[in-house]
Image (tube, grey):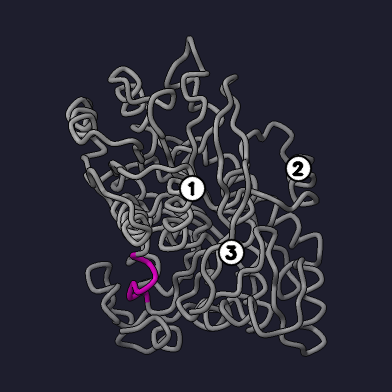
Amino acid sequence: MRASARRSAIFTGAAALLLTAATAGTGSAAPAKDEDGVLKLGYVLPETGQLSFLGPPMIESTNFAIKTINDAGGVLGKPIPPVVSGDEAGQEAVATQSADRVLAAGVDAVIGAAASGMSLSFIDRVTGSGVVQCSGSNTAPTFTDYDDGGYYFRTAPSDALQGPVLAEVIQGDGHERVALVARADDYGRGLLKSTQDALKDGGTEIALAETYDPKATNFDQVVQKVKNSSPDAVVVISFEEGTQILQGLIEAGLGPSEKGVYGTDGLRSEELPKLVSPSDPGALAGMKGTAPASAANEQYVKDLKAFAPDLKVLQFAPQTFDCVTTIALAAEKAKSDDPGNFAKEMVNVTRDGEKCDSFAACKKLLADGKDIDYDGVSGPLDFTDAGEPGIATIEVYSYTPQGTLQTLRTEESGGGE
């Protein structure tokens, strides 16, 4: 079933009460939820695990969005209660248990997970329960056509949009023979394919395109395969385990000082140089990468840092803020906290209406009976029928000789559905 058809296929009925996690995600009906007039939110985000560095910005941005909404009068005239928390922990079993606990608390929407693989571990549980799920960082292309019954959304762009930008950066640097290694999950495979396809289209020779087990304890074979392929550039699509791969590449004479080395959003971290080479953070000098743009909205950044002064990383914070705000606006437009009702408005509030860039401003327009086009703090959302951005702003980042993360530029990717 195509995503455009799924958006209208939100069902209720007695038979839906028999739905289980085993049958969700197959076009089955979701059970109806009772309305109580209060929009309740939960999250499943990385408090621990490989992506724990992403936890603080996403969690704090969730809380900040709730405060911003409540300061503007709340949703349906009532404040959003404190968010129900859950840890995805980088483990599917833990993420699934966390999702079950959050759902048991009676939430209307779940924010998260951060990792595409973690979301895939519980998406059927959430959407099959008739609860909206919105991720600010899931980028695997898998979700575009996933049969979620019309309940899953994301404010982060698909890697189908990030891959071409990464390929353009590599080709712009003059590299002609590229080796790509990626973790063997939906995130890794999806971004590997989109990058590889774009490189091929640009006439670049693919020396190696290899996936690896991210749970492995040793990546010497991965490094050896890269070395044997004799590339002039290497792309590493990974999470925390990528630090070991980068260490191996440097030891094998394949580091940024000898070859072009590129990463993606999973490696974009201010701490990466110190993790790879504690005694010489400059070992990654010249490494480049791409990621969904972190935050170009200066007012949002200023306000978020005032709300959470200790926050250092902003990656995916604006996209998470936009998940919460879009959900709240959809509930306002639907005049209902029932996910079966407001899920139908998630796409509508992001396009084809009068532009507004805050919950308060958009809420006022809705109260006046107008259609809205919410432009988020992460940029214009303009959801496609699949419930995801059709245009992405991608950041090109690099590391300095001092081991400092810096943004080189941002580029738009995509357009059209």
Front of the two marks 3 and 2: 2
Q: Is residue 14 above or below residue 222?
A: below
First of labels 3, 1 by sequence position: 3
Which numbered marker is on residue 172?
Answer: 1
Viewer-side residue, 254 vs 29: 254
Q: Is residue 342 above or below residue 179?
A: below
Q: Which residues are magenta?
A: 142-148
Front of the two marks 2 and 1: 1
Q: Residue 351 vs residue 71: left or right?
A: left
Q: Is residue 121 visible?
A: no
* Quarter occupied by residue 341: bottom right
Viewer-side residue, 248 vs 372: 248
Q: Residue 127 vs residue 352: left or right?
A: left
Residue at horizontal 39%, vertical 88%?
Answer: 5
Secondary structure beneath disc 3? loop
First of labels 2, 1 by sequence position: 1
Q: Quadrant of the N terminus?
A: bottom left
The amino acid type, in three-letter code, at marker 2 is Phe
Q: Is residue 95 visible?
A: yes
Q: Which residue was labeled with disc 2?
A: 307
The amino acid type, in three-letter code, at marker 1 is Gly
The amino acid type, in three-letter code, at marker 3 is Lys
Mark 3–mark 2 Cα distance, whole angstroms, equals 21 Å
Residue 415 coordinates in the image, percent (x, y) = 54, 73
Which numbered marker is on residue 40?
Answer: 3
Mark 3–mark 1 Cα distance, whole angstroms, equals 47 Å
Residue 37 coordinates in the image, percent (x, y) = 64, 75
Front of the two marks 3 and 1: 1
Q: Is residue 216 above or below residue 210?
A: above
